[in-house]
Image (spheres, rainbow, N blue to C red):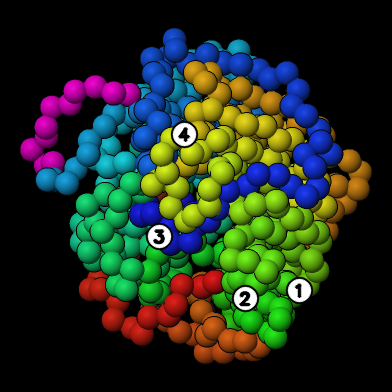
Amino acid sequence: MTPLTRPRWLLLGAVLAFALPYAAARGPQAPVSIPLEPLGYEPVPEQLLLSGGSMLTVDFVDEHHLLVTFYLKQVLKRLPDCLPEDQDRVIEAWLLELPSGKPLAHTSWRVHDHGRYLWSLGGGRFLLRVRNTLATIAPLANLGSGDAFSEWPLLETSTRQIDSIQLSPDGEMMMVESSAKKPVSITGAESHHDPAALTQVDLFHIVIPDGSGDAIEASHVGRVSIKGIGDIPMDSAGIISAAKDGLLWQFNFKGFDGTATALAPFNSSCHPRPYLVSRSEFVAFGCHATKDIQVIGGFNLRGEEMWEQTFASSLLTPRFAFAPAAGRFALSHMISSLSGEDVSKYAPELIDRQTIVVYQTDSGRQILHLDCTPIDVAGQNFALSSDGLSLAVFHNEAIEVYSLPSLTAEEKKAVQLAKESEPEVTAGELRFAQPAAEPRASQPVDAEKAANVSVPASGSRKPPTWFTLPEDKSDAQESPK
């Protein structure tokens, strides 16, 4: 997840080199290059990209189409409903055909801040945020209608501030973090969110119906209050947690059915940071004898640590793209001669480059690594196709699309084993297990069902009312680690 406010611990350090040399990975093949200048693209100022604001995106709609968006600088007329803190800008969106780069459809969105505005839901559908209203689009499915970018209203709130939106790697769980206090700016440069304030986390199961069209089914399945804002290693089945066990950290999987399962231990001198990369696999960042993140390990829900690699220096601003069906994920990070938590305070000359590595999840094999420009702290300048066979990146004033090797027979077996190891998704309302050093069944902390949370009925285009309940007053829990 990329929080709309500046993350608390996501900005961590800078990678210089792996102990396992990059030379072991397959080098980039000649890419397909799609120039963006004919679409009106102009280079985005470095300070905006380094602030963490969402200024450009690239996503696969399917294996043969891209959705590319970018900030277009222009003078805007102030609207009657503009707020004093608004930072209005225009985003250009293009549906492009691969490999030709032929434009198929275009639209513009006016957004009111520098926060993230677009998420891929999979299946050619996307989530669009404008202030505190969420809608979905399906540009390829709607291309034949003459209105490729028609919006399907999903959720909105007039009483709360959306601070963060997180999607599970399979796109089946959406976590929305919100607060009563409205910050002046989100995702990016500066946030006035009070870290001690309660954050309300609402969870939704997302279902993309079979067939064409842009309909999305979203059902509210749980709510919990936490302290602060940050990434949560959670999907539709449960959450990964870590508890100190002597000199090691013990990972646990806490299912939403109230159960908990002990997983593999991890040797780290700092609290490890786990990220789910599929329904049954996760990676974790840790430290060896320092407070700097220098280790990455791959784990599964069968209780195994599959692999571990060491960095020569600390990790800075990790961002992910997922292809669970291929057992692959892409990791982006910054390279700098300095380390520190807040890269947005770095002068541009102190960020050397942004590196992207595509991994095979079960083995840690590095399939491809490359540098891309412009450097984008928000990490939306790259995308991995759902079949894991293509990587798209912004490079200068073009989109480059790299072909990746097919899976080996052993990798296909590993993907099937990972599929068979997926925990069962809890039906209905979720239960939240209490944090515990040892895995155990426990009572739910808070899974109040929000009766007033609604989604539009099939065929309806009327936005529903969302987050109309009073602020959750239940006891807050620490943000899951």
**Who is closer to the viewer here, 443 or 87?**
87
* Mark 3 burial class by Cα count in 10 Å: few <14, some 14-19, many 20+: some
Kindly identify which residue carries mark 2: 242
Q: Earlier in the sequence, mark 1 or mark 2?
A: 2
Q: Does any portion of residue 116 appear in the rendered image?
A: no
Q: Residue at x 71, y 81 (%)?
A: 247
Kindly identify which residue carries mark 4: 349
Q: Amino acid at mark 2?
A: Ala
Rounded to the nearest angstrom, the CA distance separating label 1 from label 4 is: 40 Å
Q: Which mark is nearer the camera, 1 or 3?
A: 1
Q: Amino acid at mark 4?
A: Glu
* Residue 414 image position (x, y, % from top left): 84, 53
Classify residue 260 by image quadrant.
Answer: bottom right
Dot 4 falls on a residue whose secondary structure is: helix
Q: Amino acid at mark 1?
A: Ala
| Residue stretch rendered in magenta on the structure | 72-82
Kindly identify which residue carries mark 3: 176
* Mark 2 burial class by Cα count in 10 Å: few <14, some 14-19, many 20+: many
Q: Which mark is nearer the camera, 2 or 3?
A: 2
CB under 8 Å between discs 2 and 3: no
Rounded to the nearest angstrom, the CA distance separating label 1 from label 3 is: 29 Å
Kindly identify which residue carries mark 1: 264
CB under 8 Å between discs 2 and 4: no
